[in-house]
Image (cartoon, grey):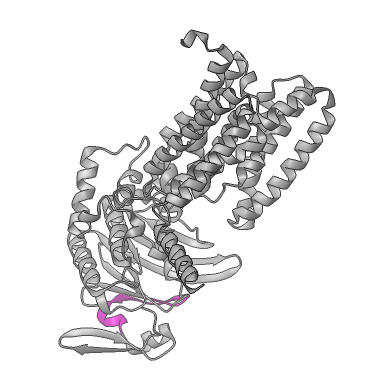
Amino acid sequence: MEPLIELENVYIEIEGVPILSDICFTINRPELLLVLGPNGAGKTTLLKLIVGILKPSSGSVRVLGKDPYRDRSIRRLIGYTPQRERIDPRMPMLVRDVILMGRLLSKTPPRIITYEDEEEALDIARRLGVDKLWSEPYSHLSSGQQQKVLIARALASRPKILLLDEPFSAIDSPSIKDIIDMIREEYSKDVCIIVVLHDATPLIEYATKILLLNRRLIAYGDVEDTLDEKLLEETYMRPVHFYTRNGVKFMGGMDSHA
Amino acid sequence: MLENIPILIVKAFIAIVIASIVSANISVHMVLRGLSALGAALAHAALAGATIAITLGINPLIGAVATSILFAILSGYSEERIGGRSDMSVGIIFGSSTAIAVLAIALSSPYISSAWRFLVGDVLGITDYELIELVSVSIIVIIVLILFHGELKYTLFDPESSEAYGLNIKFYRYLILILASLCTVVNLRVVGALLTELFIAAPAIIAYEFAHSFEKLRNQAISITLISSITGFIIAVVANLPVSGVIGVTMLSIYILALLLSVKRRRCRSRICMRYIRWVFRG
């Protein structure tokens, strides 16, 4: 069987500055993978390589056996949620438009939205608790609501691979819980989920694989093997600790940004 | 009663309605992409092309379309090279297209009256052939906008995710620039190069004060442009004033009204009012 995602000796530089080097890993079956690393580690660049927005300077990226940079059709199987801050909130868009974007753009031309598409998108919005905001302007929503709408958009394209870039940044605890529930539900449906995080705490107990990154691949593997304090210190360049309180695992010692 | 209306008024009315609909549609994309100032640059390029074509004895439409598309592509390319800074590319394109327009007009002195028509617009002097050309170009623009509505809307809202879904955002950026060039050529006949900028920028800027969705923004921009251009046209014909000038002033009046009534600026307005009331009472 073809691996879902395969990166071989990937090296990428942007405007002459090396961002990532020696990235080698393979995902053979649906996993809930956490990509951890400090700010500027190249986590977002890694997602952009997988989704095909960026081309590696050397090495190869394969998604379901195809190069996502060259073969645009393979990108329709990937649901991508960029960091919320990268979208200009002043754009006049309704929540409905944003969620249907995932549905429309995953189709082949001519792209036409049907009644079934709208029903399915509304159902996804309902699962994430944003269905009541369906006709609201996107710009009027709180950070957490915007984040949920962007995740709903990614799910609306019925992805085989879901990429989430910092889905918990600047959002409240109830919204984090909704998003975690959704991630678990999708994972149970055999969707491979890759979540870029600065702090693993919210998802650590559900993760099946961890990838530690800081301009290069520091470790990739099962949770127990990778969450080693030495490896974490090498990743974050400072001591990082794991502790359990009331049965919940916490990660501490990174810088203030989560 | 309608048969008493001179045919030139009817033709001018049709031209104005069509130019308004096309301009409002393009305006939404140009304003939201931060390219509202590019309208003036493309209009000057089209003016230069039309003037050169007249001097060479060829159809001015061909000259206008060629130069405005050339400058639109140049603008897109320079924006790409500069690193996404549209203000810088517009500055260069605006200056250079104006320089070429000035040169073209200077070199076409025997045809200066034709060049003047394109500079300030001459909708009442539009010929049957010109009206057919204008309608044809407008239909092309509208059909392309309808066909790529979703793609153009989403590449505007979130280019990064659109690219992640496999859209070629560069293609859509150049597509909208080419459609804007064609819209400029339509406007050149109706309101002239000097007022084209207003037709490309004002409709969406005014509608933005009220609209929260892309479709509402587009529909309101169309309504606003139709209201201001039809009102301006009627006033101009009745009072025997230049059509383009009156349409421009009408649009300015609607813009000022929109700023006063804007839903989005309500909080800002009440803050200014409160400050004024405090200042009066303190005084």
Q: Nearer the viewer, residue A238 or B82?
A: B82
Q: Position of residue A216 (x, y in %)?
A: 46, 75
Toward which corner of the image does residue B179 lie, by quadrant? top right
Q: Position of residue B77 (x, y in %)?
A: 63, 48
Camera-side residue of B196 and B135: B196
Which residue, as the protein is rendered here, is positioned at the far left?
A: A246
Nearer-the-camera pick, B108 or B66: B108
Residue A49, can we see it? no
Residue A165: percent from the left, percent from the top?
36, 66
Q: Quadrant of residue A203?
A: bottom left
Residue displayed at 24% across by 69% down: A175
Q: Quadrant of the C terminus of chain A?
A: bottom left
Position of B139 with respect to A168 (left or right) is right
- Is residue A220 within the magenta segment? yes
| Vertical comparison of A212 with B26: above or below | below
What's drawn in magenta, residue-wise? A212-227
Residue drawn where x is 29% and y is 85% of the image = A251
| Quadrant of the frame with the N terminus of chain A | bottom left
In this picture, residue A182 sits left or right of residue B157 = left
Number of labels in the image equals 0
Q: Is residue A108 above or below residue A44?
A: above
Q: Residue at x 44, y 48 (%)?
A: B208
A117 in the magenta segment? no
Which residue appears at 50% of the width and 58% of the height?
A: A55
- Does any portion of residue B283 appear in the rendered image? yes
